Each structure stands twice: as C-alpha cells, then as structure tokens.
Amino acid sequence: MAKSSKLVAAKGSRVLLVRRRSDGLWMFPGGRKRPRETERQCLRREIKEELPDLQLGRLQLWKELKTKNKRSGRKMSDAIFVAKKTKGKLTIGDEKEIDRVAWHKPGAVRLTPTSRYIRDRLFPKNAD
C-alpha cells in the first residue's frame, strides 16, 4: 500500500495545485495515509482538510508509485488519482500548511519532486 495519495485534476490545459507555505513549492493536493485508511479514503480526507469547498467527482487510480526520484533521491510511495470532474470554490482549509491554491499550467510553476515526477509522466509536453 502507498504511504500517501495525490490528486490530479485538470481543467483544459491547467491542473489544480497547492503551494506549500514552508518552501513556496507547488504540488498536487493530497497527503499521508493514516492507519487502516485506504488510499482513496486518504485522498478524500486530505482534500476535505486542505480544500473544504472542493467537490470531487469520480476518482480513478492512475498509478501507484513506488520508486526513487532520480532528481531528489527521495523514495516515493504514492497513489495517484485522477478526478474526472472537480468543482467548487478554491478555499484553503489548512492555512498552516498551504498558502495558495490555483489552476496552473503544469510547467509554469516550481513543483515538489514528487509533483514534478507526476507532471512529467502525465503532461510530458508541459515539463520544464
């Protein structure tokens, strides 16, 4: 089982990203799994905490990543879900962790290593 879950939601050529307050890097929303929680339950809980007014449609598991990021050396264990429909206001629920949320072109902002890895595989033409 993956240790965390991430959401990839797209609208046209833009994807939903949140910015970490700690270092200013952007990432796909999501977070760490709790004991006895499935990856899907983890994602729905994390989205409710981070973006409480966002409504997720059907979630489809894209991939489970269990690898080492070649750029950062960080081990990744993530379940990556794609949302078919996402709607609602982009309201931040966890202001201690996140300071911005927006729809961005995938290659237009500085991403965390895991989010860069996801972006490069799902949106290769938009990579840095």
Image (spheres, grey):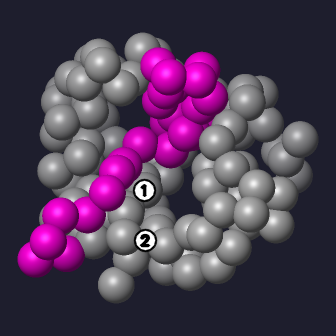
> Image height check: is 123 above or below 37?
above
Which x, y percent locates residue 25? 62, 29
Furthest residue toward bottom: 1
Q: Is residue 8 left or right of residue 71?
A: left
Q: Is residue 128 left or right of residue 28?
A: right
Mark 1 surroundings within 10 Å by alpha-carbon count, few (fewer than 14), some (14 through 19), many (20 or more):
many
Magenta segment boundaries in residue numbering: 11-38
Q: CA distance from mark 1 to mark 2?
A: 6 Å
Three-letter code for the amino acid on which mark 1 is drawn: Lys
> Image height check: is 101 above or below 16?
above
> Image height check: is 68 above or below 16?
below
Q: Earlier in the sequence, mark 1 or mark 2?
A: 1
Q: Is mark 1 in CB contact (under 8 Å) with mark 2?
A: yes
- Is 19 magenta? The answer is yes
Which circle marks residue 6 in the picture? Answer: 1
Secondary structure found at label 2: strand
Three-letter code for the amino acid on which mark 2 is drawn: Ala
Which x, y percent locates residue 106? 70, 39
Q: Residue at x 74, y 63 (%)?
A: 73
In which quadrant will I find the N terminus?
bottom left
Secondary structure found at label 1: strand
Q: Residue at x 41, y 43 (%)?
A: 29
Which x, y percent locates residue 15? 57, 39
Residue tagged 2: 79
